[in-house]
Image (cartoon, grey):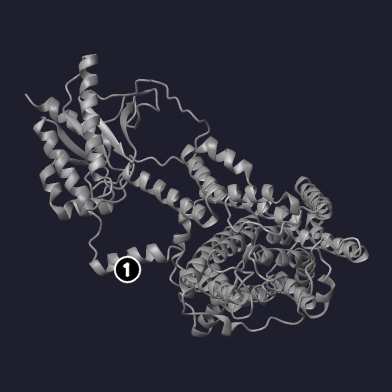
Amino acid sequence: MGVNSNRVEHLACPETTLRMHAELVVMPPLQIHNVCLPPEQTTFRKLKHSLAEIFFPDDPLYRFKNQTWFRKFILALQFFFPVFQWGSEYNISLLRSDVISGLTIASLAIPQGISYAKLANLPPIVGLYSSFVPPLIYAILGSSRHLGVGPVSIASLVMGSMLSEEISPNEDPITYLQLAFTATFFAGVFQASLGLLRLGFIIDFLSKATLVGFMAGAAVIVSLQQLKGLLRIVHFTSKMGIVPVISSILKQTDEWSWQTIVLGSGFLIFLLTTRHISIRKPKLFWVSAAAPLTSVVLSTLLVFLLKSKTQEIPIIGRLPKGLNPPSLNMLCFSGPHLAVAIKTGIITGILSLTEGIAVGRTFAALKNYQVDGNKEMMAIGLMNMAGSCSSCYVTSGSFSRSAVNYNAGAQTAVSNIVMASAVLVTLLFLMPLFYYTPTVILAAIIITAVIGLIDYQAAYKLWKVDKLDFVACLCSFLGVLFISVPTGLAIAVGVSVFKILLHVTRPNTMVLGNIRGTQIYQNLIRYRDASRVPSFLILAVESPIYFANSTYLQERILRWVREEEDWIKANNGSTLKCLILDMTAVTAIDTSGIDTICEIRKMLEKRSLQLVLANPVGSVTEKLDHSGILQSFKLNGLYLSVGEAVVHISSLWKAQP
């Protein structure tokens, strides 16, 4: 058995187009190697290996090998509770950085919590509750050092829109609140289950392209919805599409209040200006971080001092003081609304999980450490389950809070504990100060926050790099904009699945040619110095061969044969005698794929053409051997490389009389 030395791994390409000099090189006699079968394994070992690759690609138990029982116990604590991993090395210097960053994000979390609760049609106090308990739990269970935990705009919007279709938050606020807590519980159960069962690949069905479109569409809808507060419209549509929202705004012009418009527009301009300053000069991140709380304080003082002249401006009113009241008794596991609570929980759970893990990995990459996706799922899931029992709704890692946390110099998850402590002080002592806070300022804060979700550069990059990804992004964006947020999310998932199916069922095939003077075979269209080999048609398949694409591949390969024969007739070339199928990129094959190979071979034999397989991977070779198809290929039907196949078969033809 020989060693395969003909495969070349492309590591780096300095230019987009490679051009090879056509030089006649005298090649040494090429050694023909045998194709080896993989080592024999029992079915149990194969199944064990496959399951390990699917569910444990990171081998999470490698740290426990060759360790004492006590050391294994310590490693287990660190594995399930990352706080024990970094807590042993914690010091005063780290605490100083975490306190500064924690207080900084608290100044952002307090007004955001109140605003996002309003976005979910929940009492403002629930937003503050959700910024207290979940961050404490995440600080113990989470693996990210920079993730700022709390309510997020997209999950708040989706929860508000889905639940309000079932129950009106104004007509039946108690039932609506029960559904919100129940949906949060199911979101946590779903998230924790994904982490426990290591099924995180499910959230990967929301591709980056569809998320870019979904978030942009949701940001536009959220911004338009906030015009209700900026204009002080009382009778406003409950629908989320852009058409009914704009129609409702234009129909209720008699309800517009110039006082609210002036106050809201002034602070909106202030917030957008501070955001622009922080984007242009990242060192001034604290400007935009402090702007929401500053706006709340200034607007509250303004309304309080001019309360006799600003009676038309709605205010938050009384907010209850104290810690989170228990809400376990408000969870509903039966009744007519259970289905919508479960559906809302799963959808908001997927969205918040996707955002949280993406944000955590983004900042982990900047600081060169790793975030465990499965641990994050369990941490986010457990904090939502605990939050649902303590008057909190769906929370996750917020991009805006995490960015402020990172820029403020956070070193560990203690910054979340500091933030939660600041929220605790607010809940216990400062709630009366929010009585005169105008609701219009909350609308301005929401608009400023969601505008950052509209990523023009990412959409433009999608257009430049992959038109199909851009179409997926556009479909998701338009679905949210013109139909509804849940439907837009369904379209986003549908487009992502369709894209996967398209790649699976219509894999790429290409004709290979020989780069003169070498034993290298590459795409004829891509490489100008690649030329056809007389009497050979060399095809490469860049996909597994199984039931979903076997019929297509059979038809496409026979079409390649027909087109090659037409080309030979038009150019007076040598008669086609052999089809070589390069299976380097065929990573798997099933019984349908094996039947397809058999059918192609029989059809080619009827046309006096020989089928040759080149470089099949181990698992494919093993299945072909077990199916008995390799015996039908005889001695000259299977080769280690295309080059060896061409040389050997050509020599056999020359040896024939």
Tell me if residue 577 comes above or below residue 247 in the rendering: above
Task: Check disc 1 and report the residue beneath it.
Answer: 48
Residue nearest the viewer, comparing 333 with 195:
333
Would residue 587 be visible to someone looking at this image?
yes
Q: Secondary structure at mark 1?
A: helix
Total numbered badges shown on the rendered structure: 1
**Quarter of the image holding residue 400?**
bottom right
Residue 277, given in percent of the width and then of the height, sits at 80, 47
Residue 180, given in percent of the width and then of the height, sits at 58, 72
Left or right: 567 as drawn, with respect to 339: left
Residue 115, given in percent of the width and then of the height, sits at 71, 63
Q: Residues within 10 Å of mark 1 (few under 14, many from 20)?
A: few
Three-letter code, disc 1: Lys
**Quarter of the image holding residue 440?**
bottom right
Left or right: 424 as drawn, with respect to 385: right
Would residue 411 be visible to someone looking at this image?
no
